[in-house]
Image (tube, rainbow, N blue to C red):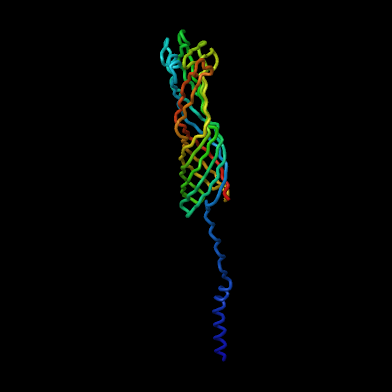
Amino acid sequence: MRKLAIGIAFAALIGAPAWAADMATKAPPPAPPPTPAYSWTGFYIGGNAGYGWKDPTVTFTPNDLNVFDVTCGGIFGSTCAPPASFGIQGGLGGFQAGYNWQPNQAWLVGLETDFDWSNIKGTGTSNFLISPGIFPPGTSNFVVNQNVEWFGTVRGRLGLTPTNRILLYGTAGFAYGRVNENVALNTVPGNTSLIGAFGFTCVAGSNCFLGNSSRTATGWTVGGGGEYALWQNVSLRAEFLYVNLGGGDTVRVTALNGGGLIPSSFSASFSALNFYLARGGVNWKF
């Protein structure tokens, strides 16, 4: 019994440190859950502002013998009106709305529509020599201007997401816009009057022929851009678009005072309406 008691005591002394060590050791806290990846899926609305530019050309053609004779007919050295080439440019601003669907973390597809008010406009001049009847020719000019009043697009988007919060995308779709065009033959060297089946009467120092057009043009657009998710619901974007609103318009520039059975006129033919734009914006995702 004495030996047994000594053995039990000895075993207790040996096991106590290990038991104490087990009591002192605590299990490590559980790891925090991983941060969920940012998702671009959902509806969004936002605003944008930017700048647009392009270089149109306008050509002029006499529509009857009277105006042909005093310009391209070369009476006393008169000349045809050369094309007017000029720049249109200006600011723009508006809003956009759309929906993105992100099937995985690598890419997404979306649909977007936007509408911008525009100050993209410009003025050009075509200088030439016009002959006022039997007198030597003098300098005259056509003044033309073009103004994109507003425009909008409806586009598809295909994007890549190199990181959770960065989106790079290409885009293409339908475009439309309101365009105003004006043409004036605003000076003549002297009082001019040619009467016939076609005719006109001009007074020196005043507009003699005028024409204008206001239309809604349609076409297409293509471009690309990038977007950064600043916060969970707010993203910043920058994009570049080429907008093509179809073939050019022809404006009939008619004599204010006909002087004959039918007023004389010129045709002012504008080149195809297209322009580039660069803009930035901010979106709110629901």
- Given residues 141 and 85, the one toward you in this image is 141
- The N terminus lies in which quarter of the figure? bottom right
Q: Nearer the viewer, residue 67 or 136?
A: 67
Is residue 122 in view from this perspective?
no
Decide which of 160, 117 is in the foreground and name it. 117
Point out residue 134 in the picture as x, y percentages from the top left corner.
46, 8
Q: Residue 271 lies in what quarter of the image?
A: top left
The location of residue 264, given as percent across then percent down, is 48, 18
**On screen, 78 above or below 243?**
above
Task: Please count the marks in the image.
Answer: 0
Taking the image as shown, residue 128 lies to the left or right of residue 97, namely left
Residue 251 position within the rendered picture, expressed as x and y whole percent measured from the top left: 48, 26
Q: Viewer-proximal residue, 8 or 53?
A: 53
Indicate left or right for 231 with 244 as reference.
right
Q: Is residue 96 visible?
A: yes
- Horizontal arrangement in the rendering, residue 234 relative to residue 247 (left or right): right
Place residue 96 in its image quadrant.
top right
Q: Residue furthest bottom?
A: 1
Report the residue that reaches farthest toward the top. 135
Please tell me whether residue 265 is drawn above or below residue 41 in the rendered image. above
Q: Is residue 252 left or right of residue 9?
A: left
Expressed as whole percent of the image width and height from the top left, the position of residue 188 reads 51, 14
